[in-house]
Image (tube, rainbow, N blue to C red):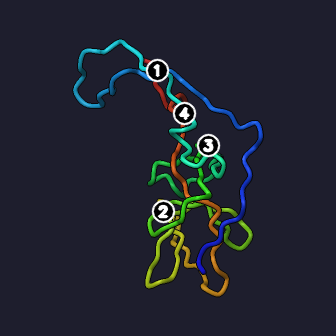
Amino acid sequence: MIASVYDFIASPGFSKTQLPLFGCAVPAGFPSPADDHLDGPFDLTRHLFRNPASTFLARVSGDSMTGAGIHPGDLVAVDRALRARHGSIVVAVVEGEHTLKRLQLRAGQPWLVAENARYPPLPIDPEAGLTVWGVVTHVIHSLADSQVVV
């Protein structure tokens, strides 16, 4: 078996977060006149966590996944109820250490692959197995530090 998942219990303090949602999509191409109305409250928890009882947030350290848009300091939503598949970005345990990588299956053997050319792909010994803690479903990162005031 290439993956195992441990039970995860959500914190009893887990609560819903609702924010106002702008009533129309914001174009990322040619600007159009703004539509200045808001829809009803948007439940951020439902949007980020399909399975709230099995989902947790983790802060990212290191730069091995920058090619996938995941940067140091970002938060990732990790769903333990989802089954990891070829191409999934996962939180895995390798030799007792947690890592965030893309899961690939090559000739039936699992590999953990970074999204940064500085890091080589890591083949997983079938004898040792692979422990996948969960599948990354969302990335949250702040643009505040990268904004330039003009």
- Residue 4, above or below 138: below
Secondary structure type for disc 3: loop
- Of labels 2 and 3, earlier in sequence is 3
- Of labels 4 and 3, earlier in sequence is 4
Q: Nearer the viewer, residue 61 or 54?
A: 54
Q: Nearer the viewer, mark 3 or mark 1?
A: 1
Whole-Å distance between the Cαs marked 4 and 3? 20 Å
Disc 1 crowd rating (10 Å Cα; few below 14, some 14-19, many 20+) is few
From this viewpoint, which residue is outermost toward the right? 12
The residue beneath circle 2 is 88
Label drawn at residue 40: 1
Report the amino acid beneath label 4. Answer: Leu
From this viewpoint, which residue is outermost toward the top? 36
The residue beneath circle 4 is 44
Whole-Å distance between the Cαs marked 2 and 1? 33 Å
Quadrant housing residue 124: bottom right
The residue beneath circle 3 is 73
